[in-house]
Amino acid sequence: MIQVENISRSFGTFKAVDSISFSIETGEIVGLLGPNGAGKTTTMRMITGFIEQNSGSIKIDGIDIRENPKEAKRKIGYMSESAPLYSDMIVADYLEYCAKMHDVDGNERVPHLASVCGLNDVMHKKISELSRGYKQRVGLAHALMNDPEILILDEPTSGLDPNQIIEVRALIKEIGKTRTVIISTHILSEVEMLCDRVIIISKGTIVADSPTQELQSRYAQKSILKVQLSDFSSEESVKNTFSKIEGVVSVSSSVVQDEKLGKVLKLELSIADGAEVRGKIARETVEKNLGSLIELNLEKNTLEDVFKSLTSEGESDEN
């Protein structure tokens, strides 16, 4: 478990993190998001003990990282965005070396991690010969060497191809079943796929902390309903009818030419949060003979929409 209470960190006159607090339970996979300069990387570095907070406290499973840093750090595994690996070493030798650094039994731990991280086929290869995806796996194996209760990953799929991303995400999901995992990433779809919870930081403060599935409904104000009609009566009559339906905030439209259907009226209806209007739209279209309904598609606000609404532009380059 991680307990962060009112931590702050300044660099000169710049306050990178301003009195933030949160706790993360064992078994949670938490996404830490924020624009460049928001303070997320500084927060991660303070949690790992890489840098010290100016004020506040950080406890790892009840151990204060400032008062007992060695004991607290033993519970943490950390993989940076570009895992610092010794490229001239063979994978097996590198992992044996990591085992010795962590004072663990390499004869037992290395084969186990090779299996867990999918490295069995490349154990005999030099790290320099590996693809970026396999290098990330080696870095992950290193982070897991001391069997940490907490795993902190900074941009774990950065630079990977689509197949590698799928493989690493599946690996993280599996590892997260028995550990606390914090992921810092700019890929919002990754957060939606991997994380149980999202913490969004902007200008050094927390602007959102919510379960991933609830975040969109909690912070988003509306969604978009896309409607298409062929053989429509008139653009204005359709817009006037739909705009009067309760829950419809606004209506925009355009007419396009379709090779098979002829003129098609395309509408985008802005829908108030929580409103369900699709049935009403369908009934009004039929009862008032507005046209032939060929599309009725609700697009809810994405995590990206929520992220944009909660964070501001013009952040500092420091993070």
Image (cartoon, rainbow, N blue to C red):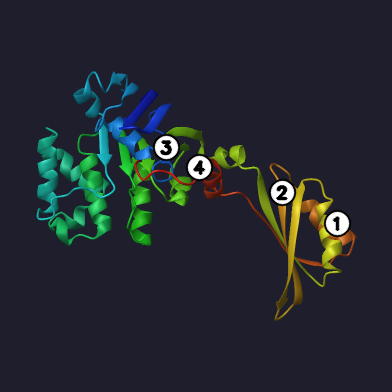
Label 4 vs 2, first from the N-terminus = 2
Q: Which mark is residue 271?
A: 2
Q: Position of residue 317 (x, y in %)?
A: 36, 45
Please state the total of marks drawn on the protein image.
Answer: 4
Eye-nearest disc, 3 or 1: 1
Above or below residue 185? Residue 150 is above
Q: Is residue 46 above or below residue 109?
A: above
Q: Which mark is on residue 311?
A: 4
Which residue is label 1 attached to? 241
Residue at 85%, 57% (x, y): give it.
Answer: 240
Residue toward you, 98 or 198: 198
**Circle 4: is it few (<14), some (14-19), or many (20+) Cα within 10 Å?**
many
Mark 1 neighbour class, 10 Å CA radius: few under 14, some 14 to 19, many 20 or more: some
Circle 3 sits on which residue? 30
Mark nearest the camera among 4 and 2 is: 4
Q: Earlier in the sequence, mark 3 or mark 1?
A: 3
